[in-house]
Image (cartoon, rainbow, N blue to C red):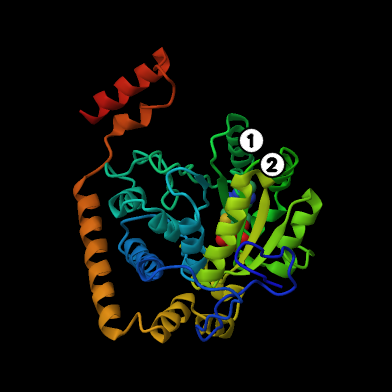
């Protein structure tokens, strides 16, 4: 039972939901978000979706080599970002979080630079595409190895507690990650240390072709929190307001000293696992079509329309603006050109030892 926005109950049988599938506000407490904030959520969700569509063009035209579609995860990702103190708290994301990057405020030029791996890439072209990070915004760089970022998130949170920085570490991952040893070790450590860490599963029910029933016999991912003595919240991740309010409650409870928590945001991934996957091999098209009818963006739009905050004119204006911004950012990123080859030797060690110096010289001579 939900009593109010500061008292969500963990381990609910049904996912916590504040918006009906038709976009009606069904929470037993007053909405306390102003018009600009609500429209900001919607703008970020639409931008995330349009970015996902743009990535498909990038892969089909050979401009990038890897994408991990995030369409279907927008409500969850926008809810997570807006519940954080962005730039103060730390985010430990995973590769499907490009919509989360948009909502965190990572500049689009940096996002495209990362996808192109060129001179516009803050990671200097040394990462796999769809593996962003941001030093400025306290976003830990994505690592491909599933769940390998859980122990670093736990460590950062323990450090925040010891140093009394008033920060929270928010760490995201998929349902498959919860079967990894790193996941259990990291969460146990954060829990036992009472660290301000919020672990967030974007449960899209598949780990590539492995469906939920073959992944775990746990009834829900949130239930796994029982093992570590921390609360586990199960949330409708297609509902941006439920995602936001529960995340805000859980983040602020951690910040106030109540320790770690686990949140499960139930979503659906509309696209294949990645550009290297054919999802028609393991899930019926009818399942994807049915999921598309529960689109988180359409649902939130209905909510805004019912409150007189949105219409077709606003929708067209928004989409035109985002399309323009995305194209401008992509062109700016492309214009940056290739990442200089010698960048691969930068920032590896605090000073370059003789053998790296020698290799750097070899590369430069070769290029000349
Ligand atoms: C340690 C490790 N094992 C296997 C892989 C290969 N792999 C890449 S993504 C993935 C599935 C992860 O699924 P999930 O955690 O549910 O996240 P999703 O991609 O569904 O969002 C696997 C097995 C990997 N990257 N790292």
Would the CB of label 2 be found within 8 Å of ligand 1? no
Residue 336 horizontal/vertical position (percent):
21, 45
Q: Which mark is residue 315?
A: none
C-beta proximity under 8 Å, tags 2 and 1: yes
- Residue at mark 2 to residue at mark 1: CA–CA distance: 7 Å
Which mark is first along the chain, 1 or 2? 1
Q: Which mark is residue 158?
A: 1
Q: Residue at x 56, y 72 (%)?
A: 268
Q: Secondary structure at mark 1?
A: helix
* Left or right side of 80 for 321: left
- Number of residues whose C-alpha sits closer than 10 Å to that of mark 1, classed few (under 14), some (14–19) or many (20 or more): many
| Near-viewer residue (250 or 46) | 250
149 vs 104: above or below: above
- Whether 248 is drawn above or below 309: the answer is above
Residue 303 appears at what percent x and percent y? 45, 81
Using the rendered view, name the quadrant where residue 263 is placed: bottom right
Residue 134 located left or right of residue 234: left
Of residue 130 and residue 208, the one placed in the foreground of this image is: 130
């Amino acid at each position: 039972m939900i009593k109010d926005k500061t008292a969500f109950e963990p381990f609910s049988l049904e996912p916590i939901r504040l918006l009906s599938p038709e976009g009606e506000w069904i929470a037993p407490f007053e909405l306390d978000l102003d018009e600009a904030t609500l429209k900001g959520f919607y703008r970020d969700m639409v931008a995330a979706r349009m970015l996902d569509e743009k990535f498909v063009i990038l892969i089909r035209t050979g401009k990038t080599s890897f994408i991990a579609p995030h369409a279907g995860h927008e409500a969850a990702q926008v809810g997570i970002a807006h519940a954080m103190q962005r730039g103060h708290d730390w985010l430990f994301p995973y590769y499907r979080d490009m919509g989360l990057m948009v909502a965190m405020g990572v500049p689009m030029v940096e996002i495209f630079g990362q996808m192109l791996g060129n001179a516009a890439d803050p990671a200097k072209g040394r990462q796999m595409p769809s593996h962003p990070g941001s030093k400025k915004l306290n976003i830990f760089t994505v690592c491909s190895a599933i769940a390998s970022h859980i122990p670093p998130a736990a460590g950062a949170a323990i450090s925040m507690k010891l140093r009394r920085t008033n920060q929270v570490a928010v760490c995201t991952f998929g349902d498959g990650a919860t079967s990894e040893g790193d996941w259990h070790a990291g969460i146990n450590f954060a829990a036992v240390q009472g660290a301000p860490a919020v672990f967030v599963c974007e449960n899209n029910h598949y780990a590539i072709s492995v469906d939920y029933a073959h992944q775990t016999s746990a009834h829900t991912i949130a239930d796994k929190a029982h093992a570590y003595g921390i609360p586990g919240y199960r949330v409708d991740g297609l509902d941006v307001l439920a995602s936001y309010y529960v995340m805000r409650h859980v983040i602020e409870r951690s910040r106030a000293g109540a320790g770690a928590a686990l949140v499960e945001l139930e979503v659906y991934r509309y696209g294949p696992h990645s550009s290297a996957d054919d999802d028609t091999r393991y899930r019926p098209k009818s399942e994807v079509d049915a999921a598309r009818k529960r689109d988180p963006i359409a649902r939130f739009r209905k909510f805004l329309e019912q409150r007189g905050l949105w219409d077709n004119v606003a929708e067209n204006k928004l989409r035109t603006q985002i399309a323009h911004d995305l194209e401008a950012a992509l062109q700016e990123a492309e214009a940056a050109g290739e990442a200089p080859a010698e960048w691969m030797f930068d920032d590896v060690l605090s000073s370059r030892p003789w053998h790296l110096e020698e290799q750097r010289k070899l590369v430069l001579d070769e290029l000349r």
